[in-house]
Image (cartoon, rainbow, N blue to C red):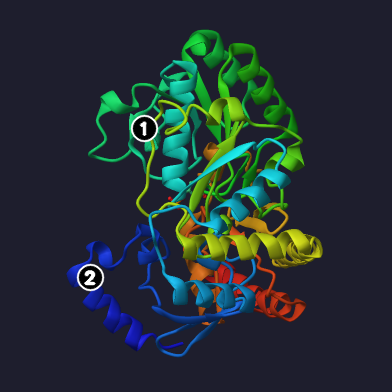
Amino acid sequence: MKLEKSTELFQEAKKVMPGGVNSPVRAFSSVQMDPPFIKKGEGTYIYDEDGNQYIDYVGSWGPLILGHCHPEVVKGLKEVVETGTSFGAPTEIEIKTAQLIVESIPSIDMIRMVNSGTEATMTALRLARGYTGRNKIVKFNGNYHGHSDSLLIKAGSGALTHGVPNSPGVPEDVVKNTITAIYNDIENIEEIFKTYGEDIAAVIVEPIAGNMGVVPLTQEFADRLRSITEAYGSLLIFDEVMTGFRVAFEGAQSLYNIKPDLTCYGKIIGGGLPVGAFGGKKEIMSKLSPMGPVYQAGTLSGNPLAMMAGYTTLKILKENPQIYKDLDRRGQILAEGLKSIVEELGMKASFNRVASMLCMFFTDKPVVNFEAALTSDTDKYALYFREMLKRGVYLAPSQFEATFINAAMGDEEIKKTLEAAKEALLEVKRLG
Ligand SMILES: *Cc1c(COP(=O)(O)O)cnc(C)c1O
């Protein structure tokens, strides 16, 4: 595999953009190589500037569940481009998108479109605070909710802590109301509520975490979160930016049979264009400006192009439930295949999978939370990643990200992936 043109472009990029990228993980630093620059995508494949072809397991980090350039999405976008790309005024496609979501997701009476997942979670928290009149929020170690100040936080020391900022530029004052909790640890969340319950506006959680690798909540923990937030009058916010319309059309909340008070979306809801959204009970959503006093606005919110890409994607998914069955079946074949290769080679790895999201952790520990995920051997992952890339398989360039299957992927691609994995893992075994 040669990456001459990409390497040249990366040198150019680094002169004018910090790290050469517009989002850090794209720089490939955790897999210890320079990134290929992508020229185009088609179905399940992407092509870089040097003409290399890859099976794409990133799918723009989740949005492209239908693969690249789905013909109906492209057609919809072309229509919109011809009639104006932004008005900053209401358009019909916004209603159609909102209706489709409200009709499909029982926990959602009303929804507000924004431009990214970060904006969705940031505003959902503001709304939760405005609605409850409380200040504290609880977030879980290893869950990622975008990069807004109060959520850029890592655990402090001790079991029951206020977090510390995990980026310079985030004042301690801003995170003093953010309490960090241990994922899937019932005792820990009960202790937090016993101490701070009356002041907690909301608990925000990725019901199936996808930003520390893939780590699902246990049903028991999810149920406890619902009951304890209810008991204390705190809101339960599901961050389904990644899982919404991914693990099932109705998202993780349908798998757990839990109605959160607010849900955040992004990724798939934009069909590959920049979108986020949050929605929930009418009583809560009506506190939002202009109906209520909690302020939020956006010049490009509900943008016609983004709405068309999202609406078309969601409509295809809703009308073709078979897609989810196929994604799940291929996810299973891939996960089982990887597992048996690992076993055959006498190696150790831990697997988590929910539908089309999966993760192979280079650790022998079951990964139930962030603390366990961190026991993974990231150097081994980096080597595995590079060996897979060489063989035309584009995985997420970090151990702590999900592998996504898309609907354009066929059994043929899964087979090719497993063949590549066999060789790649053999290399990892040989060198590791
Ligand atoms: C991607 C992601 C976000 C952030 O969304 P952006 O559009 O990147 O701002 C928030 N929460 C979760 C669970 C995500 O996966």
The verdict on label 1 being within 8 Å of ligand 1 is no
Q: Position of residue 34 (x, y in %)?
A: 35, 73
Q: Amino acid at mark 2?
A: Lys
Q: Secondary structure at mark 1?
A: helix
Above or below, 193 against 66 in this view is above
Q: Is residue 394 visible?
A: yes
Determine if residue 69 is in view.
Answer: no
In this rendered view, identify the residue nearer to me: 427 or 17. 17
Residue 266 at x, y = what percent?
52, 51
Query: Quick check: 97 above or below 151?
Result: below
Residue 154 or residue 301, whichever sits in front:
301
Query: How many numbered marks are there?
Result: 2
Q: Is mark 2 within 8 Å of ligand 1?
A: no
The amino acid marked with disc number 1 is Ser
Disc 2, SS: helix
Rendered residue at 39%/65% (across/down): 26
Q: Is residue 32 above or below residue 51?
A: above
Query: Which numbered disc flags the more N-terminal residue, 1 or 2?
Result: 2
Tell me what residue is drawn at x 81 percent, y 64 percent. Answer: 322
> Disc 2 marks which residue?
14
Residue 371 in the image: state x and y as whole percent.
53, 37
Residue placed under numbered mark 1 in the picture: 150
Residue depicted at x 22% and y 70%: 14
Q: Residues within 10 Å of mark 2 (few under 14, many from 20)?
A: few
Q: Residues within 10 Å of mark 1 (few under 14, many from 20)?
A: many
* Mark 1 in CB contact with mark 2 (< 8 angstroms): no
Mark 1–mark 2 distance (CA, rounded to whole Å): 29 Å
Q: Is 33 on the left or on the right of 207, as rendered?
A: left
150 relative position to 101: left or right: left
Expressed as whole percent of the image width and height from the top left, the position of residue 395 reads 54, 68
- The one nearer the camera, 326 or 394, is 326
